[in-house]
Amino acid sequence: MTIIDSLDPDELAIISSIVAVAITKGKSTDDINVIGNFIASLGATVLTIAAQEQYLNAKEEKRNQIMDLENQIDKLKKDLK
């Protein structure tokens, strides 16, 4: 279990806000914009990776279900002979 698994949504939001304030304190507006855009890009990439993993897992699961159904059909055909 990671620390994220043990946090409720409110706690995670508070931590996110604290980190945001900490990393932007004393920075110029330009620096804050660069940091924000970097973090947004990082987040988009992480979401893309998660979506692709989820898609591949679902595809594999469907492939396994199809194979199971084909095996069941073959077994039924043999039983009918």
Image: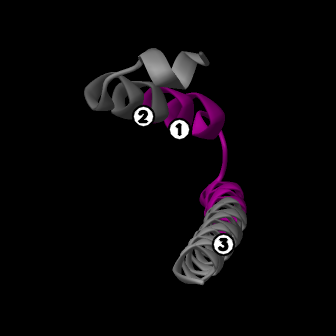
**For mark 1, what is the residue?**
20
Q: Nearer the viewer's eye, disc 2 or disc 3?
A: 3
Q: Which residue is mark 3?
A: 71
With respect to residue 39, does 18 lie above or below? above
Q: What span is in magenta?
A: 17-44
Residue 43 spot, x, y in % from top left: 63, 59
- Front residue of 59/9: it is 59
Of all residues shown, which one is farthest toward the left?
A: 10
In this view, 13 is above or below 68: above
Task: Calculate the distance from the C-alpha at mark 2 to the C-alpha at mark 3.
Answer: 53 Å
The residue closer to the viewer here, 36 or 70, is 70
Colour mode?
one colour
Q: Which numbered marker is on residue 17? A: 2
Specify few, some or many for label 2: CA neighbours under 10 Å numbering under 14, 14-19, or 20 or more. Answer: few
- Amino acid type at image mark 3: Asn
Quadrant containing the C terminus is bottom right
Say which amino acid is labelled 2.
Ser
Give the quarter of the image for residue 24: top right
Q: Is mark 1 in CB contact (under 8 Å) with mark 2?
A: yes
Is 59 placed above or below 31 here? below
Residue 57 as seen in the image, left or right of residue 8 = right
Residue furthest front as drawn: 81
Q: Name which of mark 1 and mark 3 comes first in the sequence.
A: 1
Q: Are marks 1 and 3 in contact (CB under 8 Å)?
A: no
